Amino acid sequence: MIHGFLLALGQLFDRPILLVLLKSLALTILLFVGLGFGLWHAMAWLAGYANEWMGLGSQAGALADVATLLLFVFGWWLLFRAVAVAVVGIFADEVVAAVEAKHYPQAHAAARDVPLGRSIAMGIGSAVRAIGFNLLLAPLYLMLLITGVGTALAFFAVNAWLLGRDLGDMVAARHMPYAQLAAWRRGTRLRRFALGTIGTGLFLVPLINLVAPVLGAALATHAFHRRRRA
C-alpha cells in the first residue's frame, strides 16, 4: 500500500490526472456554491417570515446570515467527502486508465471503458450510501459521545468501509462484468477496508483532502492490479 501510495502521489500532476482533479474540484465547488445560494434564500425567507410574525426587525436578517454561515460550514464538513467522491466517481475512469497506461499496460489494453451513465450511477450511489449510512448510524454516534473517542472511531470506521467499496469499484468496473462485482467485494473486504482507511485519513488533512478522491482512485488502481499479480 505504501509503495502504491507513493506511485499515486508521483503521478498526481500527470496531465490526465491533473485534468480530472481540476474538473472534479470545479464541479464540487460549484455544487457547494449552489447549496450556499439555496441556504441563503431559504434563511432569507425564514427571516422575513419571523420578522412578520415576531417583529424582530433587522435582527432577523443578521440571525439569518449567521444561520446560513453555520449551516454551510456544517454542510461542508458533513457532505464534502460524499460529494467529492461522487463527483470523482464520474471521472474516475480517466484516472484509472491513466494509471494503468503508465504502470499496467497489459491490463490497460484488456480493460473496458466504463460508460458515462454507469459512472454517474456509481457516483450517485456512493453519495447516497455515505449520507444514508451515516444518518442511519447517527443515534449510535450520539450514544458513543459518552466514551469520548467512540464517535470519532465509529465514524472513521464506517466511512473507511464505504470509501473502500467506492474506490475498489472504480477500478473493478473496468475489468469484470457488473454481475461479478458482489463476489469480488466479498473476497477483498480487508484489502478494501485498508484502502478506505488510507483514503479516509487523507480526508482529515486540510488541503490534502482536496486531492484525496483522486489520490484514492489512483491508489485503488495499484491495489487492484498488485493483488491480481500476487
Image: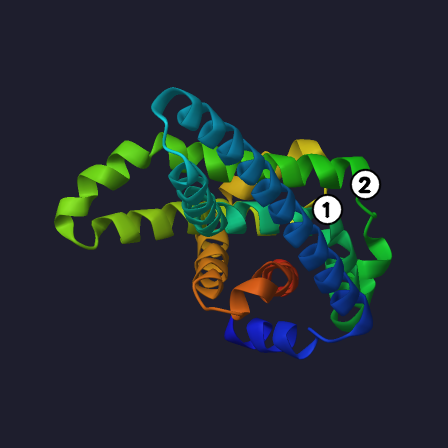
CA distance separating discs 1 and 2: 7 Å
Q: Is mark 1 on a helix, strand or loop?
A: helix
On the rendered structure, is 194 left or right of 218?
left
Query: Image check: 141 left or right of 200?
Result: left
Give the mark nearest the N terminus, 1 or 2: 1
Q: Is mark 2 on a helix, strand or loop?
A: helix
- One can see residue 97 in this view: yes
The residue lying toward the viewer, choosing from 36 and 140, is 36
* Vertical placement of residue 51 versus 223, above or below: above
Is 144 placed above or below 216 here? Answer: above
- Indicate whether 71 appears above or below 109: above
Which residue in the rendered view is the most extreme toward the left? Answer: 146
Q: Quadrant of residue 96?
A: bottom right
Q: What amino acid is found at the position of numbered circle 2 in the picture? A: Leu
x and y, in percent, of residue 170 in the image: 67, 49
**Residue 228 at what x, y percent from top left?**
64, 58
- Give the residue at x 40% y 26%: 50
Asked whether the residues under the numbered discs 1 and 2 touch, taking CB atoms below 8 Å apart as contact, a structural biologist would say yes
In terms of depth relative to the viewer, which is nearer, 63 or 161?
63
User: Where is residue 141 drawn, in percent x and y?
Assistant: 27, 41
- What residue sits right under mark 2 in the picture? 116
Closer to us: 118 or 144: 144
Q: Is residue 230 visible?
A: no
Q: Name the residue under label 1.
A: 90
Q: Which amino acid does label 1 sit on?
A: Ile
